[in-house]
Amino acid sequence: MNDQAQRDEALDITQSYIVQAPAGSGKTELLTQRYLKLLSTCSDPENVIAMTFTNKAVDELTERVLSSLKSTNRSRPRESHKQITYDLALEVMGRSNDRGWQLLQNPKRLKISTIDGLSSLITSRYPLRSQLVPPRIMAQKWERDRAYKQAAIQTLLMIDDAQHGKSISTLLLYLDNNVEKFYRLIMQMLSKRDQWLTRLYRGDALDPDVLKVSAEKIVVQHLIRLEKIAKQHLSSQFFALMSSSAKHEYGQVQSLPGHEISDLTRWQSVQSLCLTKGGLWRKSLNKNNGFPVELKTQKNELIDLLHSLSERESLREALHQVTQLPDVDFSKAQTHTLAIIAQVLKLCVAQLSLHFEHEQAHDFIEVALLANQALDDRSSISDIALFLDYKVQHLLIDEFQDTSTSQFNAIEKLIKNWQVGDGKTLFLVGDPMQSIYRFRESQVGLFLQVKAQGIASIKPTSLVLSTNFRSSQSIVEGNNKFFQYIFPTNEDIYQGAISYSPSNSASDVVNNQAIVFHPFAYDQFQLEAETVLNIVKSSLTDNPTSEVAVLVRNRSHLREIAQLFKQHNIHFESLKTTPLKDHLLTRDLFSLARALMHLGDKLAWLSVLRSPWCGLLLEDLLVLSKNDESIIYEQLADADVLNKLSKDGQKRAQHVYHCLQDVLDNQGRFNFVELLTYAID
């Protein structure tokens, strides 16, 4: 089925759209075309803002637009889709010349940025009083995690505070005084604070009735999913054996439970019978499970059934999650505990803000939250153009499925004064089927929400692109065949469940061997590796100059495959598969750190002297290692010892000694991280 009608409709710049564009559907080309068409009619280039989620994507879209404008100096292309882009670019260049935009000379007038970049622009134009310098962004996860943990530590240090100490100590007691667990849970909550922080300050946030409604919705949604999975795997024989148990709660479960709240206790019984406390399938049953000696026959039959279910990972996971479902009835004690948790979380957010202020840095969530705050503080201003110094008429957002809650709120506030018929348009493009990546805590349910309910006062028309220009017909048809069963049948905003959208290939190439399955049991790693080896060898035999790609689940999955490749002299390049801790540079840095921390660490000092920044010969290292009367650092200053080294080794050893002597002389002035950095520099 051709989707050209949808592509043509997407270029109607009087309407707003949300476009589902799977991989290979020509999404970037369509986005470029609409952007160009908007430029060809607007008063200024700044009237049109295009946003995406990574700097790489920004560079790609900017390059596409500029290349299209530059191509107008050449003849009109033959391909129909390129002709559309060419004609639109020609119109833009004409308007640029008429209005003196000079886009090729001033490409910065093209407002294409990341959504974080726009949020940063808003917050930098309206900074808090304490922010004289725009803070940098913590782009690395380890740096954000360190900030979250520091906030948790500082909160815990307030345990003796007269006002807040009781709440902190009560929460810690609730966690069995497990400090590490406290840190871990706080870090998890801070990493998604945009999802709960605003609600925490609402008056009804801890209302038992409100909590009950939310909890019931969570429980029912999960039980619907669990019932659907269990219906495929738990037979009537299973429930007959379960009901024969001498344990009362097991005996009450005689058939598959439903998905109502009242069914939860029966599902909990099924879960406790099937799984251990650790969430693994039971391998044995005894009298504690309701199967004494006189029920040996039923017990053995049930064990056999459980063994047959051991490969049903989706069922095991769904059953285990029953233990994590919230209570639907909140007692006064539980409500009080939630109030304490809320108070401690507020303290942690405050400590995190102080840490950000001290470090002059923010995470992505903080940028979005501050942008929201800036917009809220100026809610009386009727048009967002007053914030950005130019009048925004059109907003295009790529990769919309990657939108987080805080980013969505910022977008909603950006367009909250837009009205139907005022000429302003919203164009959202994304592939919700890629939401499995969970890019920076994105919420794919927001994509579904906009499709169903719109955003602010805008109700965009939904379009779906189905043509795949990247893959052959055989691959596309194969994907359609399998993924329709892998993806959920029904879409669900609350759970972020996306159904599969089938594609049609623009290619007529048919290959019966395009997709070939070689199924293996979960633990048959060696057999799987041997099969991969044979496939690669066969491919290289048929085409010696070809390149073969092997994608693996994770680094450990590559172990057996890499070993076989080495044994059979198949040269390969492993991209981003070696853990950072296994890199030689990392090992050298560890040795340097150990040497500075402990002058008597003989192995560390020998490693430092052997590393590239010194490079002593093994013979020289042997001389130093034989002397047990003094540490190696002292030997490097001993003329008698140095004379025993090779001439080249003497120069190298003296150079390293003087460098590290300068570092060690400053031990009392700087912390260890600063010392190590100084040593490396």
Image: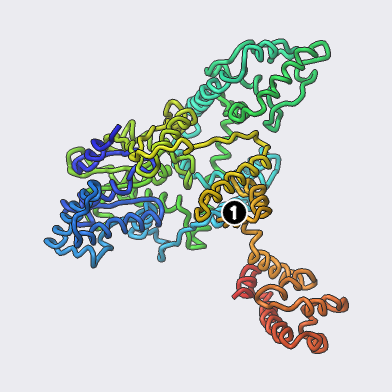
Q: Residue at x 77, y 82 (%)?
A: 636
Percent across and percent down for residue 470 are 38, 44
The reply, left or right, for residue 664 in relation to residue 288 is left
Q: Amino acid at mark 1?
A: Thr
Taking 646 as reference, is 596 above or below it?
above
Q: Residue at x 70, y 40 (%)?
A: 176
Q: Residue 270: x percent and y percent?
A: 65, 20
Q: Position of residue 639 (x, y in %)?
A: 79, 89
Front-lying residue, 173 or 626: 626
Residue furthest left as drawn: 98
316 in relation to 116, above or below: above
Q: Position of residue 654 (x, y in %)?
A: 71, 85
**Quarter of the image where the N terminus is located:** top left
- Please indicate whether residue 88 sits to the left or right of residue 583 in the image: left
Indicate whether 44 appears above or below 669: above
Residue 519, quarter of picture: top right
Q: Is residue 594 visible?
A: yes
Closest to the observer, 367 or 538: 538
Quickly name the residue at label 1. 577
Q: Residue furthest front?
A: 542
